[in-house]
């Protein structure tokens, strides 16, 4: 199968690309590398030392014998995106290429507008590019469990069968997202559902829970393939953060009471779910929804598990309750269905003690790279503007020139993409993120 992975340089995207390439599918990455710029903007870095994409692809070629095409560019640039898809002619497009941090979207107006523009325009462009160039291609879109919020009833997989004033219908499950980022996913879902209904496109929306871990079988093959592991207050997700905090003896940062309950999954299950979605495509005109997670935990339960795992490794781990910087229920009912992927064949990796040990050992291995200042949450949902010490980032046209291009490559991503990037003049190639 020919599979284009939009956002293939990111956390889920890189692991997914290698996994699918390892299964002998033909892969192409479409990515502007903007995520590396957001690290620079925030003064943060992944716990793990990720290599520039060109090097990662070279390492993969040498360990696996498989080549992966790379189309560098911005999916909000329609001409670039449609040319790249036209050149590659995918059977499936996996769309990870969005700004995915809730705190980033809540920094201030500029970051909220940027998040929604980046995510909505990218997805709309993709829908039009598919309609125009590959109408039979299956879109596998990463959504989020956070689209649903935390209602006081069971959460269904996408649709709810309801009776109202004596009449019945099956309708999209109500959405109560908790940040401008999560809202962007809701808007995307509506746009995709509409395009399926109107143009007969085929799409699968994967409402993914919070992903943890960094190693997959393929990523573990060589140090040069190492994946991201974000622990900072903007992009770090809760379990990865707790492991990094435990590794350096920093009290675990539970926000508020810690009764916030979410769906979680191992990165190895993310990649398998994507494979299953690709192998079992939605039908023409179908907008199919799966809830993609394997277990649910409260934040306080996770803190207790990390504390216990730390103790076994001889680490002193304490828990602190910080005032919740977010506006969210700190204690609530939560029961979300997630049987669709298991029915397709997913065999979940559950969060056992052994798995927590291996997560902690990654954090311990790289702990010299941890900057404890990155643990303190600085983005407060109640404020319209959060004064972070953001850095200006330099971006050039025609990045990643050293990477071999497929024969019919699209126009390069030239839009200045991030708020911090927009005002800047071109810079030398050495200034590229990851160079
Ligand atoms: P990430 O930030 O690590 O990767 C996203 C990638 O997309 C980056 O490589 C970035 O450069 C690229 N990108 C972003 N905007 C782009 C644009 N306009 N043009 C081209 N490339 C662009 O994110 P991730 O953690 O891998 O998440 C991937 C997807 O999965 C996101 O859509 C996210 O909403 C969803 N998701 C992630 C999690 C999680 O826990 N990480 C959970 C649920 C859903
Ligand atoms: N939390 C803490 N302490 C921390 C960090 C987070 O208590 O140090 C709490 C938050 O307040 C929240 C919960 O943990 O209640 C989850 O926060 P998170 O940062 O781990 O995850 P979230 O912001 O929801 O976003 C992440 C990804 C996003 C994805 C989403 C899936 O960044 O891309 O869409 O998980 S879901 O949560 O199901 O919506």
Image: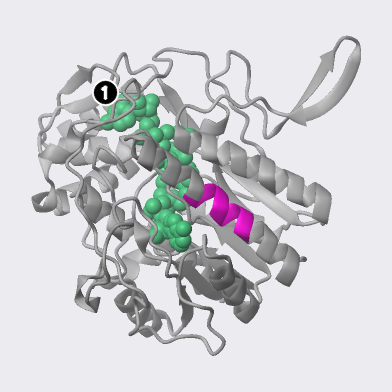
In percent of width and height, residue 84 lies at 57, 75
Q: Is residue 284 visible?
A: yes
Per the image, label 1 sits on a secondary structure element best described as strand
Split into 4 quadrants, where in the image is the C terminus?
bottom left
Specify whether tag 1 is near ligand 2 (CB below 8 Å): yes
Split into 4 quadrants, where in the image is the N terminus?
bottom right
Which image quarter: residue 140?
bottom right
Nearer to the camera, 309 or 417: 417
In percent of width and height, residue 118 lies at 48, 51
Residue located 81% across and 28% down the image: 170
Answer left or right for 158 relative to 271. right
State the residue lying farthest toward the right. Answer: 166
Answer left or right for 71 relative to 53. right
122 falls in the magenta region: yes
Q: Is residue 7 visible?
A: no
Q: Which residue is mark 1?
A: 254
Residue located 68% across and 40% down the image: 190
Q: Is residue 390 above or below residue 377?
A: below
Residue located 30% across and 59% down the image: 36
Answer left or right for 110 relative to 52. right
Q: Is residue 126 above or below residue 262?
A: below
- Near mark 1 (Cα within 10 A), the count class, few <14, some 14-19 or many ≥20, is many
Q: In terms of secondary structure, what is the magenta stretch mainly?
A: helix
Total labels: the figure holds: 1
In percent of width and height, residue 239 lies at 32, 36
Bounds of the magenta segment:
118-125
State the residue lying farthest toward the top. Answer: 165
């Amino acid at each position: 199968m020919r599979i284009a992975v939009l956002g293939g340089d990111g956390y889920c995207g890189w692991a997914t690309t290698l996994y699918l390439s390892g299964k002998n599918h033909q892969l192409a990455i479409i990515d502007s590398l903007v995520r590396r710029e957001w690290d620079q903007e925030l003064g943060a870095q992944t716990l793990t030392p990720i290599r520039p994409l060109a090097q990662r692809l070279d390492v993969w070629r040498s360990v696996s014998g498989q080549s992966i095409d790379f189309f560098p560019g911005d999916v909000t640039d329609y001409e670039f995106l449609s040319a790249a898809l036209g050149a590659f002619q995918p059977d499936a497009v996996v769309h990870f290429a969005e700004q995915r941090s809730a705190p980033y979207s809540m920094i201030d107006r500029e970051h909220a507008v940027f998040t929604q523009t980046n995510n909505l325009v990218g997805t709309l462009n993709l829908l039009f590019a598919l309609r125009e160039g590959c109408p039979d291609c299956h879109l596998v879109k990463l959504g989020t469990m956070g689209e649903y919020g935390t209602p006081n009833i069971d959460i269904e997989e996408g649709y709810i069968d309801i009776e109202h004033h004596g009449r019945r219908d099956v309708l999209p499950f109500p959405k109560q997202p908790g940040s401008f980022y999560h809202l962007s996913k809701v808007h995307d879902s509506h746009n995709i559902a509409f395009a399926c209904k109107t143009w007969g496109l085929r799409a699968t929306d994967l409402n993914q829970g919070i992903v943890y871990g960094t190693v997959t079988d393929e990523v573990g093959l060589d140090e040069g393939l190492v994946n991201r592991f974000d622990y900072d207050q903007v992009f770090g997700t809760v379990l990865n953060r707790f492991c990094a905090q435990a590794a350096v003896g920093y009290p675990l940062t539970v926000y508020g009471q810690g009764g916030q309950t979410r769906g979680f999954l191992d990165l190895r299950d993310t990649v398998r779910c994507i494979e299953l979605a690709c192998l079992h495509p939605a039908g023409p005109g179908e907008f199919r929804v799966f809830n993609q997670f394997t277990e649910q935990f409260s934040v306080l339960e996770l803190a207790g598990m990390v504390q216990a795992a730390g103790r076994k490794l001889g680490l002193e781990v304490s828990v602190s309750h910080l005032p919740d910087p977010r506006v969210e229920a700190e204690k609530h009912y939560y029961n979300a269905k997630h049987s669709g992927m298991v029915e397709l064949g997913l065999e979940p990796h559950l969060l056992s003690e052994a798995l927590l040990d291996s997560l902690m050992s990654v954090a311990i291995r790289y702990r010299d790279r941890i900057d404890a200042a990155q643990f303190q949450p600085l983005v407060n949902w109640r404020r319209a503007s959060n004064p972070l010490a953001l850095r200006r980032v330099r971006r050039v046209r025609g990045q990643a020139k050293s990477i071999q291009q497929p024969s019919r490559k699209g126009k390069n991503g030239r839009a200045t993409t991030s708020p911090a990037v927009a005002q800047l003049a071109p810079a030398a190639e050495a200034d590229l993120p990851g160079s």
